């Protein structure tokens, strides 16, 4: 599906405010992709799809995830349903829109939790979702500052911020996020 047709489909599926967020994430992801030598076309598609399931009912998302029965996807069901749209979105992109590029599908799937061994495309989508221009929270300026920073450094800062946010709210943190954080901290220690 061409990006322009996907945008029309997203307008039909998402409230205006969420659609505008998706467009801002897409533009941010394209800029990051250029900066970090990632396919801009793949970044655009993954960013457009990343919230396609965001406004589905939790029961619908659960049905999609359980039907596939992928243990990685099923693992999100033990956490707040806010995480479910990423797993459901990956399956919708694959099954309804015939996206078969595993890197794009993983970027959609892991944009909420991160994981260890993320590709550069996955990191670009995770970061773009957190720092797009519509986001406004304490510390956002530091997260948006990409000058001279590697994509790994940006990812470490973003996943650290997300985990601290969740801990501050006293909610469970998905193990994929912890694995992602640990991987990036270990990389930094190894570089010292």
Image (cartoon, rainbow, N blue to C red):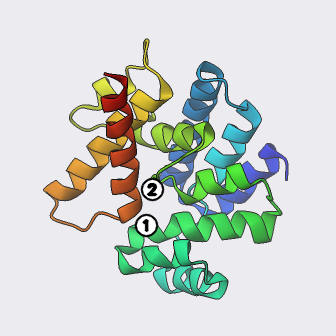
- Please say if 168 is above or below 98: above
Q: Are marks 2 and 1 in contact (CB under 8 Å)?
A: yes
> Residue 11 location in percent, x, y?
65, 56
**Image quarter (top left, top right, bottom left or bottom right) of the C terminus:** top left
Q: In the rendered image, is residue 135 in sight?
A: no
On screen, residue 155 above or below 118: above
Q: CA distance from mark 2 to mark 1?
A: 6 Å
Residue 171 rendering spot, x and y as whole percentages: 21, 67
Helix or strand or loop: what does disc 2 sit on?
Answer: loop
Q: Nearer the viewer, residue 74 or 45?
A: 74
Q: Residue at x 78, y 53 (%)?
A: 101
Query: Residue at horizontal 69%, vertical 39%?
Result: 44
Which dot marks residue 83?
1
Give how far across and how far down residue 165 sits, in percent. Answer: 22, 50
Left-right relation of 65 to 185: right
Horizontal arrangement in the rendering, residue 122 relative to residue 40 (left or right): left
Task: Give me the disc on residue 112.
Answer: 2
Q: Secondary structure at mark 1?
A: helix
Q: Residue at x 47, y 80 (%)?
A: 58
State whether residue 128 appears in this view. yes
Asked whether 152 or 28 is in front, the reply is 152
Residue 68 placement: quadrant: bottom right
The answer to which quarter of the image holds residue 78 is bottom left
Q: Is residue 183 left or right of residue 73?
A: left
Side of 179 relative to 39 (left or right):
left
Q: From this viewpoint, which residue is outermost toward the top?
A: 148
Residue under the point 56% across and 57% down: 51
- x and y percent of residue 94 in the render? 75, 65
Front residue (pair 69, 11): 69
């Amino acid at each position: 599906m061409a990006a322009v047709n996907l945008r029309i489909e997203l307008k039909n599926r998402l409230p205006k405010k969420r659609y505008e967020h998706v467009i801002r994430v897409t533009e941010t992801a394209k800029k990051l992709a250029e900066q970090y030598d990632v396919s801009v076309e793949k970044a655009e598609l993954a960013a457009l799809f990343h919230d396609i399931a965001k406004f589905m009912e939790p029961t619908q998302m659960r049905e999609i995830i359980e039907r596939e029965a992928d243990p990685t996807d099923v693992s999100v069901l033990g956490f707040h349903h806010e995480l479910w749209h990423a797993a459901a979105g990956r399956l919708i992109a694959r099954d309804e829109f015939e996206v078969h590029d595993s890197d794009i599908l993983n970027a959609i799937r892991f944009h909420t939790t991160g994981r260890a061994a993320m590709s550069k495309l996955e990191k670009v989508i995770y970061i773009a979702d957190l720092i797009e221009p519509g986001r406004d929270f304490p510390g956002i300026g530091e997260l948006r500052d990409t000058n001279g920073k590697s994509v790994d450094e940006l990812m470490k800062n973003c996943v650290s911020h997300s985990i601290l946010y969740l801990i501050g709210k006293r909610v469970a943190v998905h193990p994929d996020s912890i694995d992602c954080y640990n991987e990036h901290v270990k990389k930094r220690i190894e570089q010292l």
